[in-house]
Image: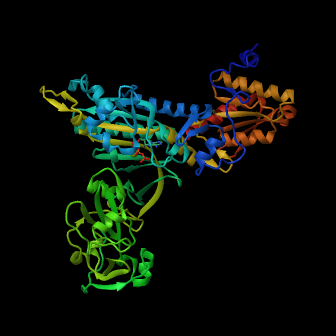
């Protein structure tokens, strides 16, 4: 008996033993759905539910069924390989963390409602970790002591918990998700810069190997803090993040981080302010019509309540306020739209707000004006009186007691801040982010090491996150068609499927089983669709699940000894003789793997 035949007998004789990598479809727990699930708004969510990969058990909480689990493990393995290559070491820290360490760092209250909190039987407060800066810093602070042990980079792959205000889009924004998080400790800023670059490079390899099309952009460091950060954005229409990039040079940034240049406007002789009636005119579009001025001459107002501080933000009518920039400038944790009550207290009239006539008495009210607004001569702005605006507003003359700060989003009309070429905007999914933290956590938590001279110094830290489950969803957003998922081989749950089209035809089944056994011997990852289903159903499921290769064993196999190999990605089909099928499948797999290396 040859090797293949031995395996064949072994497998078929032991239906419960599937070998290491292959699987019988009749055994695979993959409850596919015939209809589109109504709750899914984006493709990845829809296809993961439909292909029997995930099931929701509460808003933002999902079970991963075998196909999803396999893909996740593959992504994790790619991450492990690339992290280990940089010398980073894998650890595992608790998910449940005591409140004290978060109080020590000052983030217990800062994190706000996004943090799941719980109380143990002794009345002690804990949280489910949204991230691990505090824990890792307290973990090393008493035992990592000497500069000789540095740099060091520790990582884990683990569930994180965030009580997101709007969990949605399936795995894209869930309340429990898998994250790879790494934390580095260096002696100084130069050391951190090198570690950061290593991580930046490792992340580039990870996402390339996962097959993603991504862009690396300058980012805001948000809640995590620190000075310098990049995000890895998988470009996709459904992405919640927006990125701007230069059409000419390397410049690319998260829209929240991008700082547009001030636009200049023609200098005009200043005319005296004049109030005019603008009833039912609370939007810029209406105002442009009623005032008969170009939109560039209008001034828009947006007001936020930031931890009780009222921030009135003024941008040009055709621009939008960047709330993240506002928060960077004002500070604070909780940014919400200012209530009518708060506006009234400060003399602001909704729909007609401006600094003119506002009641600014103390620091609980700040007025931020975008520098481009300061370039306007004889513009139009609210009069803080229902149904009235002012004409001939020249902010440099008429806006008093204001702070001039860049608070607007970059638009496609802006120029690249580096080279002045045109800017483009695109949607992205943030799959990873790297931060240079500096000494924020080591100082707060008193984590120091002894330098060469024996002096205690705070660690210079970096942290690096990858959304593992979000990466899975992002891949589907990028690779799919109207029939289902199109996996890149590296993260496909299985590399291919063998489709015997008629299970009642014994010869056909035998050919398929032999091929299955052969591929199993070679450690390929194939599913044999041995279900007693019609050919149409098998094709449909194969396309939906997105196996990169379909090996079709039909009438031709029995009558002419030919098998068809279909590449899911391109739809290309190759007819090959049975005895060459396994090697041809492997050649095709090799070609597909090379696409993302
Ligand atoms: P976002 O801005 O999308 O809320 P974040 O910047 O708060 O994300 P990080 O703290 O940088 O997230 O976390 C690291 C990675 O974890 C992110 O790059 C993202 O891929 C992933 N991630 C964050 N929040 C979620 C979530 N709710 N569901 C799934 N993945 C998430
Ligand atoms: Mg982030």
Q: Is residue 282 above or below residue 111?
A: below
Q: x and y percent of residue 579 in the render?
A: 76, 28
Question: Foreground: 461 or 344?
Answer: 344
Q: Is residue 425 above or below residue 68?
A: below
Question: Foreground: 82 or 109?
Answer: 109
Which residue is located at x 31 percent, y 37 percent? 462
> Residue 261 sits in which quadrant?
bottom left
Identity of the residue furthest to the top in this view: 1
Q: Is residue 578 left or right of residue 494?
A: right
Q: Is residue 300 left or right of residue 364?
A: right
Which residue is located at x 78 percent, y 31 percent? 531
Q: Is residue 281 left or right of residue 544?
A: left
Q: Is residue 410 above or below residue 65?
A: below
Q: Quadrant of the N terminus?
A: top right
Q: x and y percent of residue 376 in the render?
A: 29, 77
Q: x and y percent of residue 571 in the render?
A: 69, 46
> Residue 349 sits in which quadrant?
bottom left
Q: Is residue 20 visible?
A: yes
Q: x and y percent of residue 86 in the render?
A: 37, 30
Q: How is the image coloured?
A: rainbow
- Dividing the image into four equal quarters, which quarter contains ligand 2? top left
Question: Foreground: 189 or 392?
Answer: 392
Q: Is residue 420 visible?
A: no
> Residue 515 sits in which quadrant?
top right
Number of dots carrying numbers: 0
């Amino acid at each position: 008996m040859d090797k293949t035949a031995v395996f064949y007998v072994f497998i078929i004789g032991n239906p419960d033993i599937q070998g290491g990598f292959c699987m019988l479809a009749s055994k695979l727990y993959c409850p596919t759905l015939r209809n589109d699930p109504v709750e899914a708004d984006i493709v990845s969510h829809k296809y993961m539910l439909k292909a029997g990969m995930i099931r929701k058990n509460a808003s933002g909480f999902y079970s991963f069924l075998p196909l999803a689990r396999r893909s996740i493990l593959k992504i994790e393995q790619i991450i492990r390989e690339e992290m280990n290559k940089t010398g980073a070491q894998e650890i595992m820290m608790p998910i449940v963390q005591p409140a004290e360490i978060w109080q020590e760092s000052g983030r217990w209250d800062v994190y706000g409602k996004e943090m799941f909190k719980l109380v143990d039987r002794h009345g002690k407060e804990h949280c489910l970790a949204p991230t691990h800066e505090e824990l890792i810093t307290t973990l090393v602070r008493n035992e990592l002591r000497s500069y000789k042990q540095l740099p060091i980079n520790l990582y884990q792959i683990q569930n994180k918990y965030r009580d997101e205000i709007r969990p949605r889009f399936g795995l894209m924004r869930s309340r429990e998700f898998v994250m790879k998080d790494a934390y580095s400790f260096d002696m100084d800023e130069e050391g951190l810069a090198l570690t950061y670059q290593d991580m930046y490079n490792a992340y580039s390899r990870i996402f390339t190997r996962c097959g993603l099309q991504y862009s690396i952009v300058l980012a805001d460091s948000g809640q995590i803090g620190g000075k310098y950060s990049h995000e890895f954005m998988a470009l996709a229409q459904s992405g919640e993040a927006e990125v701007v990039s230069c059409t000419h040079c390397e410049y690319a940034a998260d829209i929240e981080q991008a700082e547009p240049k001030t636009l200049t406007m023609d200098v005009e002789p200043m005319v005296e302010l004049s109030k005019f009636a603008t009833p039912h005119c609370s939007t810029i579009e209406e105002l442009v019509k009623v005032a008969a001025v170009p939109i560039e001459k209008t001034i828009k107002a947006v007001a936020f309540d930031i931890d009780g501080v009222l921030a009135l933000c003024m941008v040009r009518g055709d621009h939008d306020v960047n709330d993240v920039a506002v928060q960077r400038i004002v500070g604070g944790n909780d940014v919400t739209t200012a209530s009518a009550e708060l506006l009234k207290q400060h003399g602001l009239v909704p729909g007609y707000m401006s600094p003119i006539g506002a009641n600014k008495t103390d620091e609980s009210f700040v007025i931020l004006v975008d520098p481009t607004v300061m370039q306007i001569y004889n513009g139009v702005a609210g009069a803080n009186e229902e149904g009235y605006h002012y004409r001939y507003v020249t902010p440099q003359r008429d806006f008093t007691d204001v702070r001039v700060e860049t608070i607007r989003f970059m638009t496609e009309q802006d120029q690249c801040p580096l080279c002045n070429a045109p800017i483009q905007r695109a949607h992205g999914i943030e799959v990873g982010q790297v931060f240079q933290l500096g000494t924020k956590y080591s100082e707060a938590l008193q984590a120091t090491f002894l330098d060469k001279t024996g002096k205690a110094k705070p660690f210079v830290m970096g942290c690096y996150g990858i959304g593992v489950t979000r990466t899975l969803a992002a891949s589907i957003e990028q690779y799919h068609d109207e029939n289902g998922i199109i996996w890149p081989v590296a993260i496909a749950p299985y590399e291919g499927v063998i489709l015997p089209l008629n299970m009642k035809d014994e010869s056909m089944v035998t050919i398929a089983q032999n091929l299955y056994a052969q591929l199993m011997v070679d450690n390929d990852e194939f599913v044999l669709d041995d279900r007693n289903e019609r050919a149409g159903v098998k094709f449909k499921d194969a396309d939906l699940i997105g196996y990169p290769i379909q090996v079709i064993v039909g009438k031709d196999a029995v009558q002419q000894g030919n098998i068809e190999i279909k590449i899911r990605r391109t739809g290309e089909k190759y007819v090959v003789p049975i005895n060459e099928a396994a090697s041809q499948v492997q050649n095709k797999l090799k070609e597909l793997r090379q696409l993302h290396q």
